[in-house]
Amino acid sequence: MTGNFFYFLTFLTLFAAIGVVVSKNPVYSVLFMILTFFALTGHYILLNAQFLAAVNFIVYMGAIMVLFLFVIMFLNMREDTEQHKPVLSKIAAAIAGGILFVVMIAALKDVNTQMMQPAVFDSQIGMVENLGKVLFRDYLLPFELASVLFLAAMAGAVMLGKREPGEQNRF
């Protein structure tokens, strides 16, 4: 059952990823990307990585895709107003894609594809509880420094966005 579900999710991921690239309408491309992220969330669940699945679902499928869709609809992109792309840029894109394909093949040629051995498999590897233990035991200082950095960034954004009394909008 798990094997069939894996193959279904793999087919769905590849189909949606190709739809992202091939789709001429940017809104359809974003919808295909949401479908791709949904299928990847299923893969994370199959890998017993519940935290990654939840983050992928909430952050990427929820917030970032809504932002992408909002920006695309806000820009009101139409095919008749889009500039024609020269042949040289299409050739450059094809060459860059080919180079990326060669690099991916070179990186994956030495991958070990052995089957999982149930005797040595740790089923608790992707659990949120273990991630929290490692995060707060081994990486407590970097975690706290990152939180202070985010706090300073939020305070800076509020200070930059705040208008002084009598100041007019410059835009």
Image: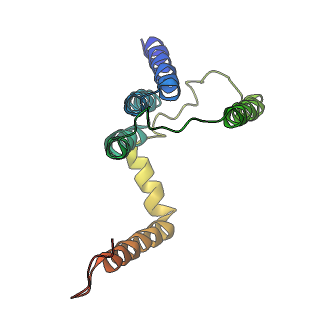
Residue 165 placed where, x, y %?
Answer: 21, 88
Q: How many marks?
A: 0
Residue 75 placed where, x, y %?
Answer: 37, 46
Q: How is the image coloured?
A: rainbow
What residue sits 40% from the left and 40% below the top? Answer: 56
Please state which of residues 98 and 122 is positioned toward the viewer in this rendering.
98
Residue 91 placed where, x, y %?
Answer: 72, 32
Please state which of residues 169 and 100 is positioned toward the viewer in this rendering.
169
- Occupied quadrant, residue 156: bottom left
Compared to 97, does 171 lie above or below? below
Residue 26 placed where, x, y %?
Answer: 42, 33
Compared to 34, does 144 lie above or below? below
Instruction: Locate residue 18 relative to residue 149 in the image: left or right.
Output: right
What residue sits 41% from the left and 27% below the top? Answer: 32
What residue sits 35% from the left and 38% below the top? Answer: 61
Tell me the quarter of the image containing the N terminus: top left
Q: Residue furthest front?
A: 80
Tell me the quarter of the image containing the C terminus: bottom left
Q: Residue furthest left?
A: 165
- Occupied quadrant, residue 53: top left
Instruction: Locate residue 162 relative to residue 38 in the image: left or right.
Output: left
